[in-house]
Image (tube, helix red, strand yellow):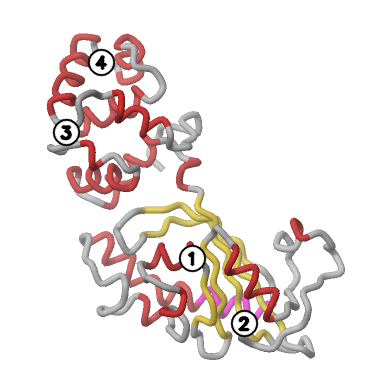
Amino acid sequence: MPDIQNCHNSRTSSPSQRFSIDAPLHCSGQFLDDFIQTSEDSVHLKDAKTGKYIQGSLGMIEIVGLKTVDEVIGLTVDDIFSAHGPFREDYGPAFREWKNRQPGKFKRLDHQVCANKRRIDLQHAFFTSKGFILFKNTMRFPILSLDHREVIATLNISKNTTFQRSLTGLLNLYQEYYPEKQAIQQLLRYCGLKRYFSKLPTLKEVMILFAMRQNSCRKYIAHCLDLSPDTVASHVYQLRKKLNTPDLHQVLIQLRSIPVDEYNGHEPL
């Protein structure tokens, strides 16, 4: 890890404020190492000259599909997104297009941070190596040398805000990147619901299932989805037939444990 100063900034003093500033950071290697290792978010540190990863958090390792932190050290963004890297699985044309854009995008952001010596904030969608789609709020910080004259590393902190969207909004998003059946399958996997089904539910059945998270009353669901109560009952009957669990209650328990914000819009994202 680069030899860099104790972390300080004249405009902040509390640890909770330390990563909400605009000026460059001057941090000791031990401070950064401790911060990255204990962070629950996706965090990594890269050498500014070589672009090689110096350290990564467990959250970052999970997203890119590696097994240990040691595996990412010394890699570059080109290695991560190469044909033989952790993103080697092919989830379709939208995934391939996104994957091909990432190395250039990351390099441009790193160059901007280094050139301006200022933090960059970014809100963006990001695929995981398993083909899941995450929403992330990202901050990239420049880390300065001992004499403060050059940026020697960049610190990336990304917070997963996926479940600040509604399930309906996420379903719409998955349909933008995947064919309908694949979109349903991937979202159910991400939400931990795929294991409850012996047969993939239809789009309408998934929409009804998501509506049942709030209220299982037929009239409520019918009103939400502009359907008749009898149509809702028919879809629920078909939904139950596709379960490999005795009743729908277990599925709803899992669904209601997902901390989504169902009031943050139901329109396509």
Q: Residues within 10 Å of mark 2 (few under 14, many from 20)?
A: many
The amino acid type found where label 1 is placed reads Leu
Mark 4 or mark 3: which is in front? Answer: 3
Q: Residue at x 61, y 86 (%)?
A: 1
Q: Is residue 7 left or right of residue 50?
A: right
The alpha-carbon separation of the residues under discs 2 and 4 comes to: 55 Å
The amino acid type found where label 2 is placed reads Ala
Which numbered dot is residue 153?
Answer: 2
Residue 34 vs residue 264, the one in the foreground: 34
Most distant residue in the front direction: 246
> Mark 1 or mark 4, which is nearer the start of the sequence?
1
Residue holding disc 4: 227
Which numbered dot is residue 244?
Answer: 3
Using the rendered view, name the quadrant where residue 76 is placed: bottom left
The alpha-carbon separation of the residues under discs 3 and 2 comes to: 50 Å
Task: For the residues labelled 2 and 4, say whether their Cβ atoms are less than 8 Å apart.
Answer: no
Judged from the image, the secondary structure of the residue bearing numbered disc 3 is loop
